[in-house]
């Protein structure tokens, strides 16, 4: 700016000096003229001769007036020049000053922009019309750690170290072609080989000639993109971590309302997120408790909290307990923004803890108020606590028992066994034991008790304490001793009884004799005592509608029968007679049990036999009947009503002949009389019976004599089987057979006549065709022999072709006759070794040309049920076909094997010959159809047609597979 201002001053000063000089000179000349004019005018005025002089001296007046006018004009011109020059100088000075100041502002703004670009995280760049960099500011090196010089002259996608996806460059090039503004994010390696993410933002530039390039800024977004990537990875890890646990992650805003809730999708406890978002934790809960008020105060003070436990109702009406831990969150300005934390379902822990508290309370209540003695001992066996019942049991105070060893209170006779059991408990060989032992009362008497001891162990399995339950059984022991004495007396009386004798009270057996032990199938007498009597019954107990009053001794109960499930697994039937007696310390029931299994079994067998007989008789479709000696029905099963329509009740007592056809009644009467009078052992006949609708039905009758218990004849029993459908079918079949036989005889006669005519025609045609052929062949031979020396080569060829054609015609005639013969020949099937037959045919054909090389692969042991003659013709045609069409091969190959296709055995003959096109396979088995010219392979085209006819006559199928130059395979199967 200083240089520009100095340059402007240097230019302005000469002009300004010249202008002042000219203006001064003009002003001086004007002043001199005015002075001179004024002098002349003043002299004339002072002498009073101005007019005279002017009039008398006209020459001087004329001289003075122009000078004055010229002076005035000169003054005006000089004044105008001075004014214009001054204005020009002022304008020029203002323009120069304005330009100087504008230049200073532009230079200041340019310097400030350069400083801003250098100090900012962006850099400037420019490209030409070919999108090649022409300018990259120096901030590119300081911000992106890249040298800008290698980029000059290159397009963005041609820069070194580029790792941007090609799709990004394709999209950018489309925008550049349309001269659109763009913003593109590229990935490039810096000078330290670190991958950087750079954002280029550009706008197109135009001049008066059109598009000149792009200008824009670049920004390094590496840190932001890496931070975003790390944030996404962290978010993914965080979400994976949250979803791998069954805890909940939650967030709250500054008003403590839920804004986010995350948990594992497999969390069995589902919380409805829409029901929680926007609500506080204490919504729906009793927040007026001291715990909630303290928690809310903590939240309002923006303090962290841990393991706050509260109960929350669920959607299904149940409740769940949660333990929450939270930390306050603040923004960058330190303002409170809410809470975030985790919640855990502690319902089970709370229930367990509550159950533990309840259990402890129950245990303490049970311990203090239990009617049985309860003691806690340490691992050494010393008492640590006892309840009041145990102290009362021993007649001592609780305080004096604490610290004593259990052995000090135990009867001497039980101390050794008790010590051994406690030692096993302490060593871990047992976890509990139960036994009866005696204690010493404070008065010195012994007390019988039943004690159950359980061990409490630590995590390592070491004994930590023992709990003992002591029950006073002194009265029971005394009662048992007395009862045993009484039982011994009773046992001596009843053990000899053959019937079982039981005494039971409240359904529980308290006494049983030896016979009862055997009847109930237990091993010992003791095994029966104490069991419930009804527990042995397999039939359900009878529940009485009204409760029975207590029975008095001497009351006899009704006879009862029960089925028993014996202890040994067998089922038995017993008959029980019971009476109420006085037994020991109260009423009891004395029952005499008698084993009636065999009798019940016989009765059941008889009933089952009768039931089975009845079921069989009623379920069969045949009519079962019995008659008396007069031939009247005494029994009919349900099939009678279905077969005849007559009711059983109205039919009983009527003679059998009343329901028979009048023509068949004498037959029925005579046959039944023969059986009743024992002239025949059985009666089997077919008769007609009438139904209620008047329809006649054929019945096949089987009857035999029936005897009473004394052995005398008591009537007839038998069956009636409805054979109407069979009789109708027999008559119909006879008529059909007669008609078919007549048709077969007529068709057979027609066929035989047609075959005879065809055979006669074949031989006639054969004879009529052979005669001309023999004549043609004979005359051809004569011509060849007589004129051989005068015939040229063409004529000899013609004669040879005539003889060859006649030979083929004769062969065709023979083949047609053979085909007709094979078609008419009857089949005589038998088992054939097809593998052996193929081998024979191959050897015969090989002998016709021993010089040819032939390889065979014949699977041995393949058999078939077919006509041997026809089968040999078929195999020979197939093998000769393979031999003929493999003649061009250096080594011919023929294979015979079998495969299974759709559960059918298929036989295959395969060769390596010339093959054929499968497009013509459909005509392969048509007579006279050839796939190859006669000049290449001889034959009449009848062989494969003959094979097909033979296979079809056996109920089989034949097909072929081939490819030109790759051989052929013929496969056939046989019907049964």
Image (tube, rainbow, N blue to C red):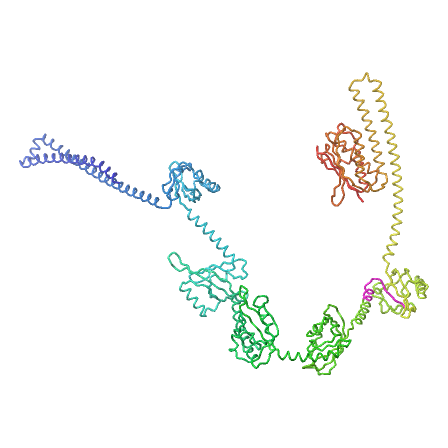
Q: Between residue 461 and residue 371, name the one nearer to us.
A: 461
Q: Between residue 243 and residue 216, name the one nearer to us.
A: 243
Q: Quadrant of the N terminus?
A: top left
Can you give x and y, in whole percent of width and height, for residue 728 in the image?
87, 56
Residue 9 in view of the camera = yes
Whether the magenta-drawn stretch holds residue 427 is answered as no
Q: Is residue 283 left or right of residue 86?
A: right
Q: Between residue 797 and residue 558, name the one nearer to us.
A: 558
Specify the quadrant of the image occupied by residue 860: top right
Whether the magenta-drawn stretch holds residue 626 is answered as yes
Specify the quadrant of the image occupied by residue 483: bottom right
Q: Is residue 510 left or right of residue 432?
A: right
612 shown above or below 444: above
154 shown above or below 570: above
Specify the quadrant of the image occupied by residue 658: bottom right
Q: Quadrant of the C terminus?
A: top right
Residue 211 in view of the camera = no
Can you give x and y, in whole percent of width and height, for residue 369 in the image?
55, 77
Query: Magenta region: which residues?
Result: 612-627
Which residue does the image show at 52% across and 79% down from the upper left?
397
Can you give x and y, in whole percent of width and height, for residue 948 in the image?
79, 38
610 shown above or below 70: below
């Amino acid at each position: 700016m200083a240089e520009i201002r100095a340059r402007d001053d240097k230019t302005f000063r000469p002009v300004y000096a010249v202008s002042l000089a000219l203006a001064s000179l003009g002003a001086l000349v004007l002043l001199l003229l005015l002075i001179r004019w004024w002098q002349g005018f003043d002299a004339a005025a002072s002498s009073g001769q101005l007019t005279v002089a002017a009039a008398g001296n006209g020459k001087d007046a004329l001289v003075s007036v122009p000078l004055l006018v010229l002076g005035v004009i000169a003054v005006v011109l000089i004044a105008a020049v001075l004014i214009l020059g001054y204005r020009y100088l002022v304008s020029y000075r203002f323009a120069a000053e304005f330009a100087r100041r504008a230049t200073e502002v532009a230079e200041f703004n340019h310097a400030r922009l350069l400083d801003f670009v250098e100090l900012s995280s962006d850099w400037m760049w420019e490209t030409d019309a070919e999108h090649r960099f022409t300018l990259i500011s120096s901030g590119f090196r300081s911000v992106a750690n890249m040298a800008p010089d290698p980029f000059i002259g290159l397009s963005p996608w041609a820069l070194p170290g580029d790792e941007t996806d090609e799709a990004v460059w394709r999209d950018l090039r489309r925008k550049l072609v349309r001269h659109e503004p763009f913003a593109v994010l590229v990935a490039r390696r810096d000078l330290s080989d670190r991958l950087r993410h750079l954002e280029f933002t550009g706008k197109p530039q135009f001049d008066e000639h059109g598009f000149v390039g792009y200008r824009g800024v670049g920004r390094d977004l590496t840190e932001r993109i890496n931070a975003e990537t790390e944030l996404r990875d962290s978010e993914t890890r965080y979400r994976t971590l949250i979803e791998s646990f069954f805890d909940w992650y939650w967030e709250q805003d500054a008003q403590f309302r839920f804004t986010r809730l995350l948990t594992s999708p497999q969390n069995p406890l589902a919380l409805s997120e829409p029901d929680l978002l926007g609500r506080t934790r204490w919504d729906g809960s009793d927040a007026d408790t001291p715990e909630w008020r303290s928690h809310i105060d903590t939240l309002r003070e923006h303090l962290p909290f841990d393991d706050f436990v509260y109960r929350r109702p669920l959607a299904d009406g149940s409740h769940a307990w949660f333990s929450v831990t939270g930390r306050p969150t603040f923004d960058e300005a330190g303002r409170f923004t809410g809470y975030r934390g985790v919640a855990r379902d502690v319902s089970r822990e709370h229930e367990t803890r509550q159950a533990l508290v309840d259990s402890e309370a129950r245990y303490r209540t049970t311990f203090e108020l239990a009617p049985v003695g309860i003691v806690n001992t340490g691992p050494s066996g010393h008492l640590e606590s006892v309840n009041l019942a145990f102290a009362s049991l021993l007649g001592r105070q609780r305080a004096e028992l604490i610290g004593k060893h259990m052995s000090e209170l135990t009867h001497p006779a039980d101390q050794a066994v008790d010590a051994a059991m406690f030692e096993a408990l302490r060593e871990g060989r047992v976890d509990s034991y139960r036994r009866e032992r005696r204690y010493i009362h404070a008065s010195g008497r012994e007390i019988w008790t039943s004690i159950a001891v359980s061990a409490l162990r630590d995590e390592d399995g070491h004994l930590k304490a023992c709990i003992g339950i002591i029950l006073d059984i002194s009265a029971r022991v005394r009662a048992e001793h007395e009862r045993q004495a009484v039982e011994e007396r009773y046992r001596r009386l009843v053990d000899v009884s053959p019937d079982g004798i039981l005494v039971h009270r409240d359904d529980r057996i308290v006494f049983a004799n030896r016979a009862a032990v055997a009847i109930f199938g237990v091993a010992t007498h003791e095994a029966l005592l104490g069991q419930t009597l009804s527990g042995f019954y397999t039939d359900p107990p009878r529940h009485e509608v009204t409760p029975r009053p207590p029975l008095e001794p001497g009351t006899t109960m009704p006879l009862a029968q029960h089925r028993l499930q014996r202890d040994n697994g067998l089922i038995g039937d017993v008959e029980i007679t019971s009476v109420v007696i006085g037994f020991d310390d109260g009423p009891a029931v004395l029952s005499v049990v008698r084993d009636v299994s065999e009798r019940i079994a016989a009765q059941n067998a008889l009933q089952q036999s009768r039931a089975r007989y009845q079921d069989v008789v009623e379920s069969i479709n045949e009519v079962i009947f019995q008659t008396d000696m007069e031939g009247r029905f005494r029994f009919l099963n349900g099939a009678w009503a279905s077969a005849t329509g007559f009711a059983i009740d109205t039919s009983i007592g009527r003679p059998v002949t009343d329901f028979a056809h009048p023509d068949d009644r004498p037959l029925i009467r005579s046959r039944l009389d023969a059986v009743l009078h024992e002239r025949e052992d059985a009666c089997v006949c077919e008769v007609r019976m009438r139904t209620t609708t008047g329809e006649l039905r054929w019945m096949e009758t089987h009857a035999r004599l029936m005897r009473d218990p004394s052995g005398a004849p008591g009537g007839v029993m038998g069956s009636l089987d409805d054979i109407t459908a069979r009789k109708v079918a027999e008559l119909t079949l006879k008529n059909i057979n007669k008609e078919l036989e007549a048709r077969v005889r007529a068709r057979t006669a027609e066929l035989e006549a047609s075959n005879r005519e065809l055979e006669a025609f074949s031989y006639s045609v054969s004879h009529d065709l052979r005669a001309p052929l023999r004549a043609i062949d004979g005359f051809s031979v004569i011509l060849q022999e007589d004129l051989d020396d005068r015939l040229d080569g063409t004529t000899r060829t013609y004669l040879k072709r005539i003889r060859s054609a006649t030979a083929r015609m004769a062969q065709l005639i023979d083949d047609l006759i053979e085909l007709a013969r094979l078609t008419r020949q009857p089949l005589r099937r038998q088992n054939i070794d097809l593998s052996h037959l193929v081998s024979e045919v191959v050897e015969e054909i090989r002998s016709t040309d021993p010089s040819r090389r032939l390889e065979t692969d014949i699977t041995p042991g393949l058999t078939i049920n077919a006509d041997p003659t026809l089968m040999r013709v078929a195999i020979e045609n197939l093998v000769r076909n393979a031999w003929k069409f493999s003649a061009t091969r250096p080594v011919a190959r023929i294979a015979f094997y079998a495969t299974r296709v759709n559960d059918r055995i298929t036989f295959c003959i395969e060769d390596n010959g010339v093959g054929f096109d499968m497009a013509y396979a459909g005509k392969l088995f048509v007579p006279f159809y050839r796939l190859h010219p006669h000049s290449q392979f001889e034959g009449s085209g009848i062989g494969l047609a003959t094979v097909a006819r033979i296979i079809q006559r056996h109920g089989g199928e034949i097909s072929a597979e081939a490819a030109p130059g790759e051989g052929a395979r013929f496969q056939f199967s046989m019907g049964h």
